[in-house]
Image (cartoon, helix red, strand yellow):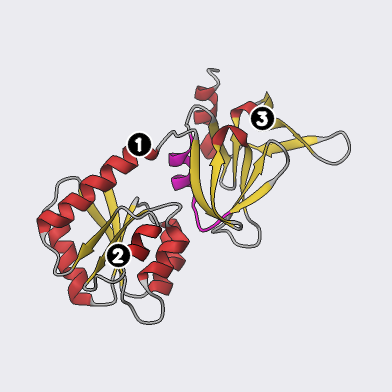
Amino acid sequence: MIKCVILDDELLAISYLKLLCEQIDNVEVVRAFNDPKIFLSEIENIDCNVCILDIEMPGMNGLQVAELISGSKKIIFTTAYKEYAAEAFDLNVVDYVRKPIKKERLEQAFEKAAELLQTSHKKDFIEWNTNIGKTVIFTEQIAYIKTSEIDSRDKIILLNDGTNIILKNLNFKNLLEMLPPKDFAQVNKKEIIALSAIKVFSTNEIITSIPLEGENFLKLHIGEAYKNSLVKMFGK
């Protein structure tokens, strides 16, 4: 199922897109916005995998919005102008649909998105927007992920060699969908651990192989909501 969010500054365009989406199988519009800033403030907490973005909008255009979320969402651009096509595809988007939009053309875009969603999961490497730009990170190098204390929309990845990389504007649900499920587990609302970095697993706590100052190692508290899935994962 494709769960999409629409962003367009014109309410009539939003209504028309909703109408088209309702006629396409396995597509659900979960939210719609006409303000890019509100969209960006809320998108992390919305259960969706595809965003339909208008390019021409006042204040902040769709290209700028896509730069901030393309690491976590598949993007379909809509616009009445053809001059943005090259720049749009530089962002590695799913598709670029010219207005006026026809159902058949939108259906093609969703088919592309569905294929990408199926193949993007469980990769050995993933491309993300980070504090050092668009970055390819090999999942086998990831030891630990936590929510940034400075901005909860960002996530901090600790690699096996001790390097820290900040993932921009990505929630845990979408992050876990990108990671190989056999290799990673969420232990509470703010932390994900690579199973390879676990030394000891108990009912309430995980002791990792990640060193801290002195001779201590990073310990993680297991949240109540995550205990059952962790127990099943370890076969206890």
Q: Nearer the viewer, residue 59 or 155?
A: 59
Above or below 28: residue 161: above
Label of residue 171 in the image: none
Q: Which residue is mark 1?
A: 119
Q: Residues within 10 Å of mark 1 (few under 14, many from 20)?
A: few
Residue found farthest to the top: 235
Q: Which residue is mark 3?
A: 197
Above or below 56: residue 160: above
Q: Nearer the viewer, residue 81 or 34?
A: 81
Kindly report the distance in space between the C-alpha atoms of the residues bearing marks 2 and 1.
24 Å
Taking 157 as reference, is 117 left or right?
left
Taking 37 as reference, is 161 left or right?
right
| Residue 173: in magenta span | yes
Under circle 3, the secondary element is: helix
| Residue drawn at point x = 43 percent, y = 69 percent | 64
Q: Where does residue 226 sit, x and y in percent of width and height?
A: 53, 36
| Screen quadrant of the C terminus | top right
Q: Where does residue 192 sit, x and y in percent of width and height?
A: 58, 40
Q: Amino acid at mark 2?
A: Ala
| Residue drawn at point x = 58 percent, y = 32 percent | 140
Counting residues from the N terminus, which is met first, the one under dot 2 or under dot 3? Answer: 2
Above or below 192: residue 67: below
Magenta stretch bounds = 167-179
Residue contact at pointers 2 and 1, CB within 8 angstroms:
no
| Residue 122: in magenta span | no
Kindly report the distance in space between the C-alpha atoms of the residues bearing marks 1 and 3.
26 Å
Under circle 1, the secondary element is: helix
Q: Where does residue 40 sit, x and y in percent of width and height?
A: 44, 67
| Screen quadrant of the N terminus | top left
Counting residues from the N terminus, which is met first, the one under dot 2 or under dot 1? Answer: 2
Q: Nearer the viewer, residue 2 or 159?
A: 159
Q: Which residue is mark 2?
A: 85
